[in-house]
Amino acid sequence: MRCQTLVLTLGLLLTSVAQAQWTEDTPVVLKGKIVSMDTRVRTGQVVIRNGKIEAILSASATPPAGAIVIDTKGYIYPGLINLHNHLKYNFTGLYDVPKASANHDQWPSGKDYQRYVNNPTALVTGSNFYARQDEALKYAEVRAIVGGETAIQGAQNSPAISRTLVRNVELKNFGEDTIGQRALTIDSLFWRHKEDVMPSIKRQRAWLFHLCEGIDDYSRKEWSDSGWDPTKPFSSSKSARNRPGVVEADLVFPGLVGIHCTAMEREDFKQWKAITGGVPKIVWSPTSNLMLYGATTDIRAAKLEGALISLGTDWAPTGTKNLLWELKVADAYNRKQSPRLFRGDKALVELVTTNPAKILGWEDRVGKIKVGYYADLIVVDNIYSRSGYKNLVMAHEVNIQLVMVGGNPLYGDEAHLEKLKVYNGQKQYERLPGSSDTRPKVIDMLQDLSARKGDMTLAEVIKNLEEGLDLDTAVLAKILNDGKRISSTKVSYKARDYVRANLKKKLERAQMPVPASLDDPDSDLTPAQLETYIELKYPNLRKIDGLPSFYTDPLFLDRLEKNLFWKDLGFDLRKYLPPEIAVLKGMNAALSQDD
């Protein structure tokens, strides 16, 4: 899964010390307090080799010969597993939810949503525009790993990320592909092909499905709709609704994982348990739920029926940047409940480690620190010495010292990566924008050159995304006019032809002059024509001044606290900010822009 030693000659990778460096079969020893999630927290050493945890030694034991030893003076945890996200949107920032919604069909509308979420994403990632979806997905993976995530759900099946940085849970992992997902509810297309897809769904070890997202009866009927009449045509319309819930559709099986489940009640969870003979499996995204609906999943009811619960960040427009902060929202929410939903910080940490591993059927591979498990690990500063579990709940992105996926050290403090990722005097990493000069964070984006755009640095990813956000029509003209190479001898101009034809239609509809060049199939599109096209196609679009910071900072919390529901929740997330994050840090102040 992971590439080994690479010799890089890129200019940004400056020369440094020469020493024995990481390879898959070189033992790496992490010394620190081990939060195994299986036994008590204790000081010791984790030995990693060939992608797995080879041994767990006492603090005084002698490390293996030839080992690279890192004395972390911190806590060592299993990597965090994020079971719900929409990766391609994660280069955008929080947007102001303009009004309350009762279900998931209501909020994806209005000028604000188009302006700050849908239109920028369509422009930047769309194949007929800047076509930067690969960059968007890579950026989202960086955002995840900065927050200690080693696995994430919600990626497109893209060769640009199939073997890079964090694990994408619905793609191939551990030599198998047993996880599936569906981002949409049951619609007419799904229903028409139900019999064709059902066998493959039922074979999945875990099938993640958006379920009952909302707070009204319309949402709850996605679980079970007694009004469903199989003798009548399928219909999603409100006036003539005839749509089954997952119960009627025979989709309640042991592998079902419900994302959100905000409209479900205890009797629904009880029914789930009765049908499967097992416990309900739920992905909880409290931040997004509270921002959109002012309410979240009835976790107490789910727990009374033995539900297995994990956390997911949902997406950038209405979610936290990473699981570190979704964990803090869960903690803040838990403290407002009486009695509390989760007793002790360990139960919270289980939401991002052991529980998601069990949900995925990966409980014998990741989610704990045990001999023979894959070395998906994170190292976090010791900021709360009395409890390793509380320590993670309180940790900020700056406290992440090291992230390893399958034993490969991919992100963290330069002081650690210097010992692990310098080959023949060349640093195989680059600096994270916005990180401290006194404690720079670095990332290895180039550890798998066989991936699509596997040689693309983070600096290039950021540059390419910002060109789209800047609406640089000269760049767009070059992309479209150069075409897309589909073989060594053939170039496709499908995107250029599509835009030319659609621009002509929009100009005619708006009764504007149509340039003669639009009737010439071989003519190039000009930046001015593309500027007109974007204005006509996306009238509500507003320029977003750059990418948000990878770190959670006061600027992000300022924006979050403006949400129409959030300000009344009484959550004090600022208490989780470390003293050094007292001022805005990041690539820019994109999130501070007014509507």
Image: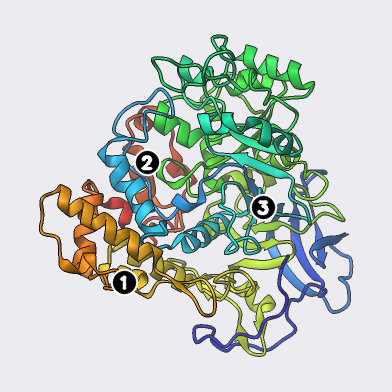
Query: Mark 3 falls on what kind of element?
Result: loop
Q: Which mark is residue 320?
A: none
Compared to residue 469, the image places residue 332 above or below, namely above
Task: Report how far apart the C-alphas of labels 1 and 2 lie in the structure.
Answer: 33 Å
Q: Amino acid at mark 3?
A: Leu
How far apart in space, not on screen, are marks 2 and 3 (Cα)?
32 Å
The structure residue drawn at horizontal position 57% and vertical position 9%, both measured from the top left corner, is 226
Percent from the top left, x then y, of residue 395? 57, 50
Closer to the eye: label 2 or 3? 3
Q: Earlier in the sequence, mark 1 or mark 2?
A: 1
> Seen in the image, is 53 located left or right of residue 479?
right
> Could you say whether the residue bearing mark 1 is in a helix, strand or loop?
helix
> Crowding near pointer 3: few (<14 within 10 Å), some, many (20+)?
many
> Which amino acid type is marked by label 1?
Val
| Corner quadrant of residue 512 | bottom left
- Classify mark 2: residues with Cα within 10 Å, few (<14), some (14-19) or many (20+): many
Find residue 171 and name its label. Answer: 3
The residue indicated by pointer 1 is 475
> Residue 560 has which mark?
2
Percent x, y of residue 91: 42, 55
- N-term-proximal mark, 2 vs 3: 3
Q: Residue at x 86, y 64 (%)?
A: 60
